[in-house]
Image (cartoon, grey):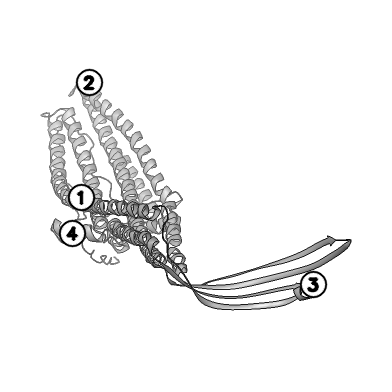
């Protein structure tokens, strides 16, 4: 009864720990507030939004004021002269024809759009990073849980081998093999515990604080293919809607306008000028020099550039080359986004196929373990056969859990590559999680070794009904309503 009591205590601890478990959306909310990369992108967006205002200033009037105040002391022919003078001027300049300033204004507006596209890309990257870090922790937890269950199973097999050796129905080889597997399981647990701590620090890097208990994937979750179920629409969306592609398209437009701005170095300029000036002087020995006067003027000022040492022509050639570079960068961004969409789409389909194959392998491995356990009890199998079957079952369960997580992440990356990833997609994934502690990995009913030569009757474990299916590319169903008993 002691193993059963221990299992109950472990399950109770898991339940209490998961009662206040954080889910994926809570981790994402903490990352929005505390992630340094996202905070940096938010500041870059705020800075980028000022470029349109700065560029618009070239089209608006400028107002300048200036003045002087002087005091003169002169000595001549034994006489000292002291007089003062002051003057000020206020000038208003309104550009009327400045092609370069107009192109700069258009570039400023495009720069704001580039900043917004870059921020949107960083926001999508944050969703992917949060999801990857979250499911890495769950995968590490699953690996550690399965290793602990494997240790328990091996320890029971070791005890059985020792008892059989004591009564003379087995050799010491069975005991040594079980002991070696047990020691290996302990070593693997140490590595898995370290890996779990490393994965949890990745969550801490995003949120700024250590994570507590985390909600886990529902038992028996079934995933369906993305919608649409063809790769071409996803690739087409990636080539047009991906935020990196949009940013490069805007960069190409900026480069094109930079060519026009550079060519404006050959164009004339026309400004409206309005000014008012006043000057005054007092204390002069010449009476006619004392007094004050004002001057008001309004008119236009034009300038025609004639020769600038070939600087304008060189600048135009430079901007044409930069435009070609921007065009090539755009093509590279499109190809990169399309390739990411293809890889993610194939990753989703491959993950779904792996999940189905591993589910079948889990059933087969469970049956193989039951057969080997029964065969060992009746003497037609040896201890190493049982240990190998246990190892295969736990490896299959670990790989199945990892395949589910990878498939979910591939679906998020697919939407990110297509430029359609939003917080609502993360909420749909969050609906696949539950704060309830998962049942411990079951092997067989209580595996107390019987007397030598007495066969064991094994009853296969019952299977729970699968959870509702959620399409990686579609909407998630509503949460099931839990009825009180």
Which of the two discs, 1 and 3, sits closer to the camera?
3
Asked whether disc 4 touches disc 2, contact meaning CB atoms under 8 Å apart, the reply is no
Distance between the alpha carbons at the discs numbered 4 and 1: 11 Å
Name the residue tied to disc 4: 236
Quarter of the rendering containing residue 42: bottom left
Distance between the alpha carbons at the discs numbered 4 and 2: 65 Å
Distance between the alpha carbons at the discs numbered 1 and 3: 87 Å
Left or right: 137 in relation to 474 = right
- The disc, 2 or 1, on the residue closer to the chain's N-terminal end is 2
User: In percent of the image, x 14 and y 35: which residue is there?
Assistant: 374
- Residue 364 appears in the picture as rendered: yes
Asked whether disc 2 touches disc 1, contact meaning CB atoms under 8 Å apart, the reply is no
Name the residue tied to disc 3: 286
Q: Position of residue 303 (x, y in %)?
A: 45, 67
* Picture mark count: 4
Could you say which disc has been placed on residue 172 in the image?
Answer: 2
User: In percent of the image, x 25 and y 26: which residue is there?
Assistant: 162
Distance between the alpha carbons at the discs numbered 2 and 3: 129 Å
Q: Position of residue 392 (x, y in %)?
A: 18, 37
Q: Position of residue 78 (x, y in %)?
A: 89, 61
Distance between the alpha carbons at the discs numbered 3 and 4: 86 Å
């Amino acid at each position: 009864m002691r193993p059963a009591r221990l299992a109950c205590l472990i399950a109770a601890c898991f339940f209490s720990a998961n009662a206040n478990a954080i889910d994926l959306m809570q981790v994402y909310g903490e990352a929005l507030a505390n992630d340094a990369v996202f905070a940096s992108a938010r500041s870059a967006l705020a800075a980028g939004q000022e470029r349109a205002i700065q560029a618009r200033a070239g089209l608006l009037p400028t107002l300048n004021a200036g003045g002087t105040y002087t005091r003169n002391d002169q000595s001549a022919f034994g006489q000292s002269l002291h007089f003062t003078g002051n003057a000020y001027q206020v000038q208003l300049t309104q550009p009327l024809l400045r092609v370069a300033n107009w192109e700069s204004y258009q570039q400023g507006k495009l720069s704001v759009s580039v900043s917004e596209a870059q921020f949107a890309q960083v926001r999508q990257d944050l969703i992917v990073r949060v999801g990857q870090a979250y499911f890495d922790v769950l995968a590490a937890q699953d690996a550690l849980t399965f290793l602990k269950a494997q240790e328990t199973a091996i320890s029971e097999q070791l005890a059985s081998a020792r008892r059989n050796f004591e009564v003379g129905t087995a050799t010491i080889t069975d005991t040594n093999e079980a002991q070696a597997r047990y020691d290996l399981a302990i070593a693997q647990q140490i590595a898995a515990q370290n890996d779990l701590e490393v994965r949890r620090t990745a969550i801490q890097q995003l949120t700024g604080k250590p994570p507590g208990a985390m909600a886990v994937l529902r038992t028996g979750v079934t995933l369906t293919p993305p919608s649409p179920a063809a790769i071409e629409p996803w690739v087409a969306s990636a080539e047009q809607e991906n935020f990196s592609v949009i940013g490069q398209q805007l960069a190409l437009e900026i480069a094109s306008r930079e060519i026009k701005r550079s060519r404006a170095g050959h164009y004339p300029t026309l400004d409206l000028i309005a000014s008012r000036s006043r000057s005054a002087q007092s204390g002069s020995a010449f009476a006619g020099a004392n007094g004050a006067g004002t001057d008001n003027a309004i008119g236009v000022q034009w300038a025609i550039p004639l020769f600038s040492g070939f600087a304008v022509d060189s600048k135009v050639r430079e901007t044409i080359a930069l435009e070609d570079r921007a065009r090539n960068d755009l093509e590279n961004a499109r190809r990169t986004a399309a390739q990411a969409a293809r890889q993610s789409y194939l990753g989703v389909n491959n993950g779904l196929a792996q999940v189905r194959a591993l589910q079948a392998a889990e059933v087969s491995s469970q049956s193989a373990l039951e057969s080997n356990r029964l065969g060992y009890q009746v003497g037609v199998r040896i201890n190493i056969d049982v240990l190998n079957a246990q190892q295969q079952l736990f490896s299959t369960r670990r790989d199945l859990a990892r395949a589910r997580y990878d498939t979910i992440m591939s679906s998020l990356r697919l939407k990110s590559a297509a430029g359609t990833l939003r917080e609502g997609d993360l909420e749909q994934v969050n609906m696949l999680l539950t704060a309830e502690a998962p049942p411990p990995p079951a092997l067989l009913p209580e595996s107390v070794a019987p007397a030598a030569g007495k066969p064991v009757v094994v009853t296969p474990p019952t299977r729970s009904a699968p959870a509702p299916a959620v399409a990686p590319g579609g909407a998630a169903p509503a949460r099931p309503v839990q009825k009180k008993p």
